[in-house]
Every structure is written in structure tokens, then in C-alpha cells.
Image: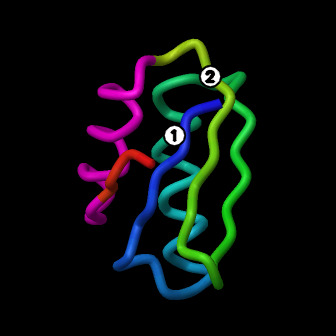
Amino acid sequence: MIEFNVQDMTCGHCASRISKAIIGVDANAKVDIKIEGRTVSVESKATKEELAEAIADAGYTPQAI
């Protein structure tokens, strides 16, 4: 499980964009997003760096936890 804190994720639209970005990197990824806690947890074969880059490309600032 790879986890990120994404402080600039504030709503469902943000969560949807992040989820789509991660699925774009790994179509089989399991994504769990907690908007209140501003956390993104991912089970994926992609690396932490690849996932962070996908989140950043979607316009957000991921910080690995």
C-alpha cells in the first residue's frame, strides 16, 4: 500500500481527477481516497514515484506518507 497526503485535494471533483490519473498509470490499481483526511491510498504495481507523478500531472501536490 502506497499512501500520499494531498493537502490541495478539497472535494469530490479533486478525488475523481486523482483517481482517474492513478488508473491511467495502472488500470488495476485499487484507490482509496479520504477527502476529509486528504489522503490517497493505492494498491498498485506502479512505483511510488510513478503514482506521485500522475497525481502531480493532475494538478495536485502529493506528499508520500
Task: Decide if residue 53 is on the left or right side of residue 51.
Answer: left
Residue at the image position 68 percent from the left and 70 percent from the top: 34
Where does the image place residue 11, in percent across and percent down from the top left? 56, 86
Secondary structure of the residue carrying tag 1 is: helix
Residue at the image position 45 percent from the left and 48 percent from the top: 65
Point out the residue furthest to the top here: 45
Q: Is residue 45 above or below residue 54?
A: above
**Mark 2 / mark 1, whichever is N-terminal:** 1
Question: Is residue 57 in the magenta section?
Answer: yes
Question: Is residue 58 in the magenta section?
Answer: yes
Give the quadrant of residue 37: bottom right
In which quadrant will I find the N terminus?
Answer: top right
Where does the image place residue 16, in percent across and percent down from the top left? 60, 65
**Circle 2 crowding by C-alpha within 10 Å: few under 14, some 14–19, many from 20:** some
Residue at the image position 32 percent from the left and 54 percent from the top: 63
Q: Which mark is residue 56?
A: none
Where does the image place residue 50, in percent across and percent down from the top left? 34, 26
Task: Decide if residue 20 is on the left or right side of residue 27.
Answer: left
Tell me which amino acid carries mark 2: Ser
